[in-house]
Structure formats: C-alpha cells, structure tokens
Image: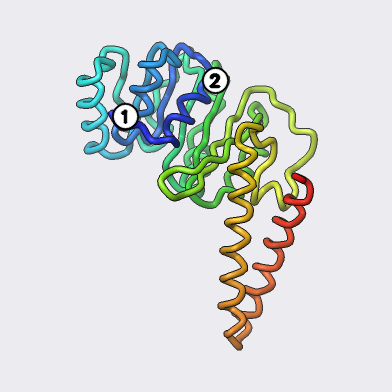
Amino acid sequence: MNVSNRLKNIVDMIEPCRLLADIGCDHGITAIEALRTSKAQRVIAADINKGPLSAARENSVREGTADRTEFVLSDGLYSIPQKEDIECIVIAGMGGILIRDILERGGLDRFKSLRQLILGPQSDLCLVREFADSISVLGIASERCLFDEGKYYFLMDLRRDVQEPRPYDKGELYFGRNIDRACKKTYSDYLHFRKRVLSEARASAERGRNETARQRIIDFDREIELINTILKQEE
C-alpha cells in the first residue's frame, strides 16, 4: 500500500490512543496505518461520500484492519457517535474553510475524552489557526511543515489544555507558530518559496493600472514583509 509522506507524518503525530476518529477518511489509508503501527487500538473511519467509504472498507479488509474499524457515513463530525473513548480526531486533506466549518458545527465539547486534534488544511491556513486559537480546551502545541509530491503542507497538532501565551499575531496566523524543530529546514524552504511566488505576482500586478492592481501590490508587500520578519527571527 502506497503511503504518502503527508499521511506518514499524520500517523506519526498521533499519540497512542484507544479510539481514533478519521474525518474525511477518503480511502482509509490513515486509519489503516494508525492501526498497523499501533497508534490506535480502534478507528472510526468517516466520510461524507459513499464511494470513498466503500473504498476504505475494501482496503481495510485487504490489509486486515476491518475488524477494528467502524465505518460511518458522516458530514464532518455530525454523525460521529459520542463515544467516551475517542481520544484523537484527525481532519485532513480538505480546504481550511471546510475544516473550520466542520469544527464549528461538530461540537468538540461532545467528546469528553478527546486529548488530541490533528488538522491538515490544504488552504486558508490562517482561518484554521484563528479558529484553533479560539478553542478553549485545545491549543496548537506544534506544527509540522513538510514537502510532498511537489507541494508544501502544514499539519497542526492540537492538545488538550495547551495554554497559548498570547493571541496569534498576523505573521503567525499566516505562517504558523511553534514549528517542529525537525521541520525547520523545510519551513525555511517554504518561506523562501512563498516569497518568490509573491514577488512574481507583485511584478505581474505592477503592469496593471487600476485600483485592484494597486491594492494587490499593497497586499503582496505586507505578506512579503511578514516573511522577511520571520526569516530574520529564524537566523
């Protein structure tokens, strides 16, 4: 079974738990690997669509983990049973706005034994960080930055009773805080990559002569300045 670097990192981040809920499980690879590596004793594999859930079931049968997996058709957390031993929830592989909406609608306070929440938004990371910063019982303990199949990804590890010393500032909302030391090189590479992308977009916008182009240049300059500040701090 082919396991991507991103999924390997998600599984590696999971603290050993009695019951893991994988929301948006797709083909069930995270759930299978969590069981295979003994990160979880049992798994709830949930997806909003019947097709991926069926594929997850077939893969679990083939890999010998189906007897420890409960397959649930669920829109986010909505239909996840309120079991007392759910200790970790993974929500990854979807857009940040959707992840934020799932968390807002899901009622995390239903899961009294929840100790860890792993988030892997593929866009709008600042919105996810902003929402995570507002959760009273969970806080972002660390983030991983990784490169997989030509793309950069961030994974957020939220733990119970992590007390953030202060609200996230603008740069931290865009580019994270408490980056795992093992990812520092990849994180630096990402910041330089993002700066190049913004610089190229700025150069393109300079050819425009309307108010929209001028506003875009201002936005690009602000983000580039945030990156420069972080890079200076990382030296």
Secondary element under disc 1, as helix, strand or loop, is loop
- Residue 163 lies, in percent from the top left, at 74, 28
Q: Which of the pair 156/184 is nearer the observer?
A: 184
**Disc nearest the viewer among 2 and 1:** 1
Dot 2 amino acid type: Leu
Classify 77 as above or below 209.
above
Q: Earlier in the sequence, mark 2 or mark 1?
A: 1
The residue at which mark 1 appears reads as: 28
Residue at x 51% of width, y 22% of height: 14
Classify 221 as above or below 5.
below
For label 2, the crowd category at 10 Å Cα-Cα, with few meaning under 14, some 14 to 19 and many 20 or more, is many
The residue at which mark 2 appears reads as: 114
Secondary element under disc 2, as helix, strand or loop, is loop
Please identify the quarter of the rendering in which residue 20 is found: top left
Q: Which of the pair 38/187 is nearer the observer?
A: 187
Judge from the rendering whether residue 38 lies leftward or rightward of residue 234; answer left or right: left
Please identify the quarter of the rendering in which residue 51 is found: top left
- Residue 105 lies, in percent from the top left, at 49, 38
Residue at x 62% of width, y 81% of height: 206
